[in-house]
Amino acid sequence: MENRTLCGSNGKCINEPGSFICECFPGYRLDPGLDPYLYDPCPDIDECSENPDICIPLSFCVNKPGTYTCACSDRYFPSTGIIWTQDTVCETVETVLNKPHQFEKLTKEKAFFAKMDRQLKENSGKPIHEVSVGNAFSTVMEVAGVGPYIDPPKVSSAGDGETGSIILDLAEGLVAALLVDKEEQTAIAIKTPTLDLDVVFLGPNDIKPSGFSLVADGVTVAINLEQVANNNNGSAAVAFMKLKGLENLLTHLFFETENLTDFGSDIFSVSLPTMSNTNLSDPVNFTVQHTKTLPESGLMTCTYWVSDKSPPPESDFLDWLNRICVSIGLFFFALAILTFLLCSWNPKINNTARLHLCINLGLSHLLLLFNESFFVDKLACKAIAGILHFLVVSSFVWMLLEAVQLYMLVRRLNKVQVIERDGLPQYVLYPVGYGVPVVVVGVSALVYHPGYGGTEAGA
């Protein structure tokens, strides 16, 4: 009688006259010392131990049953994105960001997110190993300017809700890639400095407890997996995730309330990956561990992030009107500058303050006309923001200097005297007119440099 258990699950039995031989599947090796009647004679080959240089530089090897996988080390990312090929190399995050991309009108950070999202959708049927998913999350947070490797965070205290929503959307695709081809009960746990992820999958033939609880990092999620499975062809999955640095993007300032608000616990995400029907009649209960003490007069409430708000539509008419109005303003500023330079009716009249006031206002308007072209490069955007700040402060200082000169002139009107050159001397005007703005901008950049740069509306 044929014995289907011979050679185990990692090989096939080949019949020979009076005997048989075992032929192992790729990634497994026949061990002659193992009795095929008692043991699986085809154990897994540990490619990582046998060949330490099997992966490319700046990466590490992870053994899998029948095969192995390579993943880039922390702070490095595959040159081909989340999908590895024969030409993949590990590059720094900055190198990956500075590569040309096909997404016009997007910053290099947003283009990186868009490319990853497209790769996930185009390869939705391909599984991604846990280590690659962990590396992807680490890179995504570093690109966003937050996380354990970015200190201090590169986002303002107001947060960045748009980027936070993008990361949560990417998280769904990355978690779903972990469960591709899964048919039996599976528990996946990924713990990195950036990510704390726990995923549980139950196949059609697995028992689904109605009172299932997932406990991870101080948070308990109680959900009726039996109901989830009934709505999804007998399968059920639940994922719990905490990302370090997400609180810098989805800050408490997004609460639409007049009250003073703050977070009393860490931000976490719970999803039902690969589930097509997530309509549940039974509630999902969360038990959350507080990280802060509630004030006696405070009110504790549960809140969640709504990421389906669409950005306001762009208006070509408003953009056109803005350019026309700014161009008209620049024309008159140019006329004023030429007038003060070429048409001085009396050499004793000091037009220095008026001239530099017009120059600073004109340059600030000129930058406002072309500032959209600098949104793609974050460094250029910060530089333009700093220059605009300097020009605006300088304009106010020159206004003050002109007011001082007018006051000095009016004070002398009650006296009969020979007309002398009015106003403050040049060695006072220039150091004050441009020195004060330099000090103001320098102190501002030193105290809070993340305040310079694009916002959600612009960059």
Image (spheres, grey):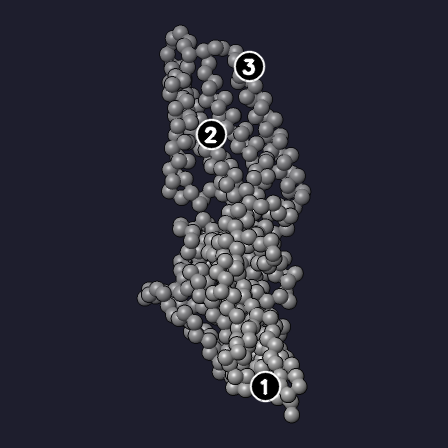
Could you say which quadrant of the image residue 413 lies in?
top left
In this orientation, does residue 303 appear? no
Residue placed farthest to the bottom in the image? 1
Q: Is residue 403 left or right of residue 172?
A: left
**Mark 3 and mark 2: Cα distance apart in space:** 21 Å
- Identify which residue is drawn at 40% across, 67% down: 300
Residue that mark 2 sits on: 395
- Identify which residue is drawn at 47% across, 65% down: 49
- Identify which residue is drawn at 61% across, 45% down: 100
Sequence order check, earlier mark of 3 and 2: 3
Percent x, y of residue 407: 40, 22
**Image disc number at residue 342:** 3
Circles 3 and 2 in contact, beta carbons < 8 Å: no
**Mark 1 and mark 3: Cα distance apart in space:** 101 Å
Give the amino acid type for the residue marked by disc 1 in the picture: Thr
Give the amino acid type for the residue marked by disc 2 in the picture: Ser
**Image disc number at residue 5:** 1
